[in-house]
Amino acid sequence: MEKEIRIVIGGEECRAELLVEEAPHICAAIVAALPLNGVLSHAKLVDREVFFPIPFFIDEQENLKTSEKGDLAFWNGRQSVCIFFDDMVPLGATPTFGRITANLEGFQREAAKVWEAPGTKITFDRLSASAGRAEP
Amino acid sequence: MSEILQQIRTAREEIWDEEPLEVKQLSSRKAARGQAATTMLYATTKLATLITFLNHMRGVARDGDVDLATMKAVTVPYVRFHAGVIGGFYQLAETARIVRLAEGALEEAGSLDEFASLVGELSIYLNRIDYWIDLHIPWAAFGRVFEELGP
């Protein structure tokens, strides 16, 4: 299974490590669904969090932890991938399946715009997939 | 049963990457004092409530220690009520059609697994509709105005 994925958000390309040891079922479900395309909304209660829905449940509650800057988590209650892009106070422990390891600064630049202008496109894909840019 | 599930999945695939026209039109559905902001806010609230209920019922069904007739008796009227709401003032006709489709299939579900699959598929469909609506709500502007108004 992939241990690293590429994330394209707006005009930025980033990389994220998948926590395949800590969250094997969630990572397997995410990898099986790649490429995952989404349209970003900003969280309304937690600051510095963006999310996008995916069309399936992942019921395993693996690697429940208090989210930190750069974490990728899955909220089964709304079938959403949540990305915590800067320091914030999370609502609680969330199943965490990855973390951004390269170009977090670029992710932050794009994600910070989502509060004022939601709808930024995001793609999770295999590293081997051809490079591209998501439309803002 | 499997045919209805497939119909809901197909409907979901059609709206997943392309915002449905009825959601685009929702922001022109005027409510009190000729504005549509409350239309959008109430629509997302109604959908979020229904989605939370469906996810809860899915979880209860998957746990398995419950009888199917009771699950139907609780769920079907609730889903039917929301189909009326969604297709009524909000005029989300296709969304209401999908909810009614699921409602009919829930009545016919032959097992808890079937029941859980149906409410799950309906939840995923409605989740996508709700997040399309969410994108139209000017949360940042609301936040600014609220703070300007003060306590």
Image (cartoon, grey):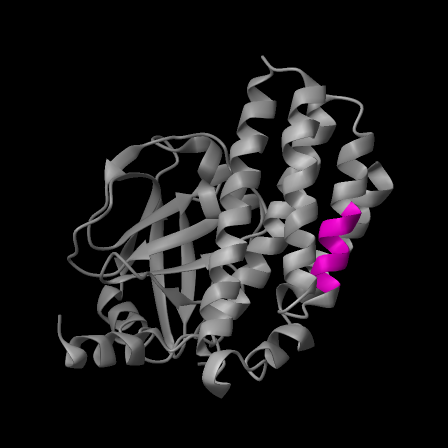
Kindly tell me whether residue A38 is visible in this rendering: no
Position in image of residue A36 (x %, y %): 54, 58
Kindly tell me whether residue A5 is visible in this rendering: yes
Left or right: B82 as drawn, with respect to B101? left
Q: Which residue appears farthest toward the right when viewing the image? A: B3
Say which residue appears at 70% left-offset and 20% top-offset.
B68
Relative vertical location of residue A120 with respect to residue A26 in this rendering, above or below: below
Give yes or no for residue B97 being in the magenta stretch. Answer: yes
User: Which of the image's four quarters has the C terminus of chain B?
Assistant: bottom left
Left or right: A115 as drawn, with respect to B17? left
Position in image of residue A59 (x %, y %): 49, 32
Position in image of residue B145 (x %, y %): 24, 81
Relative vertical location of residue A86 with respect to residue A28 in this rendering, above or below: below
Say which residue appears at 54% left-offset and 80% top-offset.
B27
Which is more toward the observer, B118 or A99?
B118
Q: Which residues are magenta?
A: B94-101
Position in image of residue B134 (x %, y %): 46, 68
Give yes or no for residue A73 being in the magenta stretch. Answer: no
Q: Which residue appears farthest toward the top when viewing the image? A: B65
Say which residue appears at 49% left-offset and 53% top-offset.
B48
Say which residue appears at 41% left-offset and 77% top-offset.
A10
How many numbered badges does the structure rendering display? 0
Magenta segment main secondary structure? helix
Q: Which residue appears farthest toward the bottom when viewing the image? A: B34
User: Which of the image's four quarters has the N terminus of chain B?
Assistant: top right
Quadrant in the rendering for residue B90: bottom right
Relative vertical location of residue B67 with respect to residue A79 in this rendering, above or below: above
Quadrant in the rendering for residue B57: top right
Which is more toward the observer, A128 or B62?
B62
Which is more toward the observer, B107 or A25?
B107
